[in-house]
Image (spheres, rainbow, N blue to C red):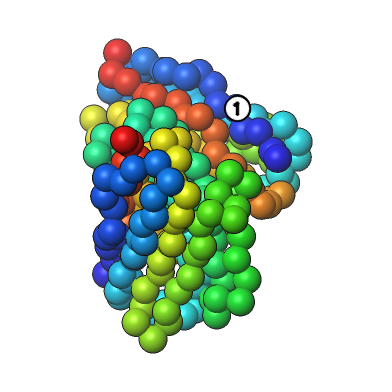
Amino acid sequence: EIVMTQSPATLSVSPGERATLSCRASQSVSSSLAWYQQKPGQAPRLLIYAASTRATGIPARFSASGSGTEFTLTISSLQSEDFAVYYCQQYNNWPPITFGQGTRLEIK
Amino acid sequence: EVQMVESGGDLVQPGGSLRLSCAASGLIFSNYLMTWVRQAPGKGLEWVASINEDGSEKFYVDSVKGRFTISRDNAKNSLHLQMSSLRVEDTAVYHCARGHFDLHVWGQGTTVTVSS
């Protein structure tokens, strides 16, 4: 089973600033990686798939990069609605599909 | 608009059974793999099971193998999860989602609580 590790666990950033979230896989997942955003009481929302492709309707301030074992999600200028929990997920080696433990992005 | 609406969650005793359903609309349901993902209270996301387009292939996380069965009814645009021998650790919100790899559309979830 591939273990996904996200860092940091909590990230405090001011609105308007840039946020950078990291995700590391225990072995290569190629570019088979997705990022999700989840707000309290809501279902997760797909942001990025194939490591760097924005999903439908996702603003351009969300970008992602990486391949193999190291991945990054960047939010260029944080808006109030961006404060949430973010999860990475690999789908290269399955079953099982595995998620990271999440990064909580909070207002500084 | 694509929508997934889950139902069937309830409070059940350990060892009990429950059947979850997911009603899909706004899509050609039979064209998509479908997945169940769960989230224990205050915890992260855990993939539970997936099923291919015609229901001939099913995949499960090890912790539910032999206890849970995923199925679908393409004529009724519905996905199901039959859960038996439920354990306290199965307590979670269960979401259905369109897809198997990247999960593009999610339902709001239905809550399963396993407790005596």
At which x and y percent is residue A97? 60, 48
Q: Against A49, is A102 above or below?
A: above
Which residue is at 34% across, 43% downward? B13
Would residue A40 be seen by someone viewing this image from the given angle? yes
Number of on-image labels: 1
Dividing the image into 4 quarters, which one contains the N terminus of chain A?
A: top right
Q: Against A54, is B27 above or below?
A: below
Dividing the image into 4 quarters, which one contains the C terminus of chain A?
A: top left
Q: Chain of mark 1?
A: A
**Residue A11, image quadrant:** top left
Give the amino acid type for the residue marked by disc 1 in the picture: Thr
Residue extending furthest toward the right = A27
Which residue is at 24% across, 39% downward? A41
Q: Is residue A98 left or right of residue A108?
A: right
- Decide which of B12, A81 is in the foreground and name it: B12
Residue extending furthest toward the bottom = B75
At which x and y percent is residue B31? 49, 78
At which x and y percent is residue A16? 30, 24
Would residue B103 be seen by someone viewing this image from the given angle? no
- Decide which of A107, A87 is in the foreground and name it: A87
At which x and y percent is residue A103? 45, 26
Which residue is at 51% across, 57% downward? B68
Q: Against A38, is A95 above or below?
A: below
Which residue is at 34% across, 65% downward? B22
Q: Residues within 10 Å of mark 1 (few under 14, many from 20)?
A: many
Q: Secondary structure at mark 1?
A: strand
- Decide which of A97, B113 is in the foreground and name it: B113
Q: Can you identify the residue that label 1 sits on?
A: A5
